[in-house]
Image (spheres, rainbow, N blue to C red):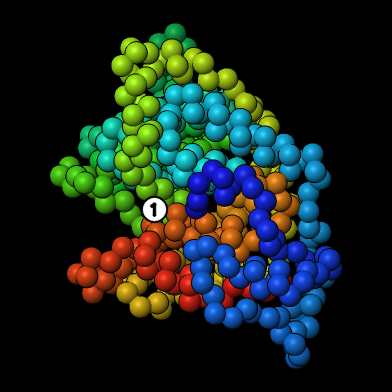
């Protein structure tokens, strides 16, 4: 993903269905120059045989592309307003803001990895206020029990009955702070909540409020007293967002604000709700109407499948990774005011969608290779489809 400017501006060479107006050869050639990819040749549809017939049938039967102009403007305005309100208390880190919002409106969750002290908790609090949603936080520790997360039945002396008292997981925006500090049995409790949107206690299933969005954090520089997240749970996160230290100008702004003795709680009170929970759910449904061309689905499929036999990767991505790329590209497209996804949308979210789903080979780890570097090389090896 790129910075805010890349997100809010329209792309010069969008994907359009086969029945849309055609472009010139120069424009078509320019559509291949999609950062960070550097394709060598375009991928054309099958020209004959059963594959061509199936391809044509899928294209004709596909959904109509495009969204009403007022809907596209609404999404662009929502993103700009959310970024403005969050920016009242949280400075910089545009990629974190964009990644979290894309995952939220796609119906996913995010895992944030960064060193301590970069404002992850402050960001989650500001996001909850800007979305008009109930915010909750769980500080994970080695002695945390599943009942501390989802709640437990408590005996009522007056009624002589057990009554379920919900835990902190019953929130709409949940910050799971330092999630890797708790053992697997507690991980499993959060896993059900993330996957099913419900928690089961004593055989009774309790539905969580909607929307339900988890921002989990972990510290990459500490290993003592931590528990490695199981692959099954890591795969449940739509994105893994890696945040670095703020740039010089942003860090100076943070220091300048604190030098004025401005209380963070007072700043949070200035954050105004941009949406309601009902509006978020309605906008999630609209995201599903964003058109994804069959050629783009084939492109996503090739990227995911290539991770399973690419050099220096010992373990490839699951099918869920492809679903994350499809849905994430839809949301990113509508944030940019388009009703159709493009290869550029896919390229921007390849790293956050796949970096936690693939594992480097021992040789790559010895060489000190970075997973994002390997994924960038993989994407460059896949031909960008010509639309």
Quadrant of the image occupied by residue 285: top right
Q: Position of residue 118 (x, y in %)?
A: 32, 34
- Seen as rendered, the residue at the extreme top is 158
The image quadrant where one finds the C terminus is bottom right
Residue located 44% across and 8% down the image: 158
Residue located 34% across and 13% down the image: 260
Horizontal side of residue 129 vs 224, given as left or right? right
Decide: is 363 above or below 139.
below
Q: Which structural element holds mark 1?
A: helix
Q: Which residue bears the numbered disc 1?
A: 234
Q: Nearer the viewer, residue 213 or 91?
A: 91
Horizontal side of residue 15 vs 115, given as left or right? right
Q: Position of residue 236 (x, y in %)?
A: 45, 52
The answer to whether any part of residue 160 appears in the image is no
Q: Position of residue 382 (x, y in %)?
A: 52, 75
Q: Nearer the viewer, residue 123 or 128?
A: 123
Residue located 36% across and 65% down the image: 373
Decide: is 240 above or below 281.
below
Q: Nearer the viewer, residue 355 or 202?
A: 355
Within 10 angstroms of label 1, few (less than 14), some, or many (20 or more) residues?
some
Decide: is 239 above or below 208.
below
């Amino acid at each position: 993903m790129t910075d805010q400017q890349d997100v809010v501006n329209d792309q010069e060479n969008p994907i359009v269905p086969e029945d849309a107006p055609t472009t010139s050869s120069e424009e078509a050639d320019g559509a291949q120059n999609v950062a960070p990819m550097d394709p060598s040749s375009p991928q054309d549809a099958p020209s004959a045989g059963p594959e061509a017939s199936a391809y044509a049938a899928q294209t004709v039967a596909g959904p109509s592309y495009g969204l009403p102009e007022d809907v596209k403007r609404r999404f662009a305005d929502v993103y700009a307003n959310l970024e403005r309100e969050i920016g009242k208390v949280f400075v910089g880190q545009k990629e974190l803001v964009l990644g979290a919002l894309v995952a939220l409106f796609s119906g996913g969750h995010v895992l944030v990895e960064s060193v301590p002290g970069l404002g992850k908790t402050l960001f989650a609090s500001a996001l909850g206020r800007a979305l008009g949603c109930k915010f909750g936080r769980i500080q994970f520790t080695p002695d945390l029990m599943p009942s501390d997360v989802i709640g437990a039945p408590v005996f009522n002396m007056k009624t002589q009955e057990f009554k379920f008292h919900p835990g902190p997981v019953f929130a709409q925006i949940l910050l799971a702070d330092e999630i890797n500090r708790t053992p697997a049995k507690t991980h499993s409790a959060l896993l059900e909540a993330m996957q099913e949107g419900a928690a089961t206690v004593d055989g009774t299933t309790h539905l969580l409020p909607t929307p339900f969005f988890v921002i989990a954090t972990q510290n990459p520089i500490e290993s003592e007293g931590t528990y490695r997240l199981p692959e099954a749970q890591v795969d449940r996160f739509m994105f893994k967002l890696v945040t670095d230290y703020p740039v010089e100008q942003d860090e100076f702004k943070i220091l300048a604000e604190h030098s004025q003795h401005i209380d963070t709680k007072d700043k949070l009170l200035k954050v105004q709700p941009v949406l309601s929970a009902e509006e978020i759910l309605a906008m999630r449904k609209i995201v599903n109407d964003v058109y994804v061309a069959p050629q783009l689905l084939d492109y996503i499929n090739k990227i995911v499948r290539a991770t399973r036999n690419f050099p220096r990767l010992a373990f490839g991505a699951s099918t869920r990774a492809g679903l994350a790329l499809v849905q994430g590209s839809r949301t990113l497209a509508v944030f940019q005011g388009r009703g159709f996804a493009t290869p550029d949308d896919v390229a921007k979210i390849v790293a956050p969608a796949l970096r936690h789903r693939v594992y480097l080979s021992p040789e790559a780890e010895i060489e000190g290779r970075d997973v994002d570097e390997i994924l960038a090389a993989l994407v460059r090896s896949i031909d960008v489809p010509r639309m």
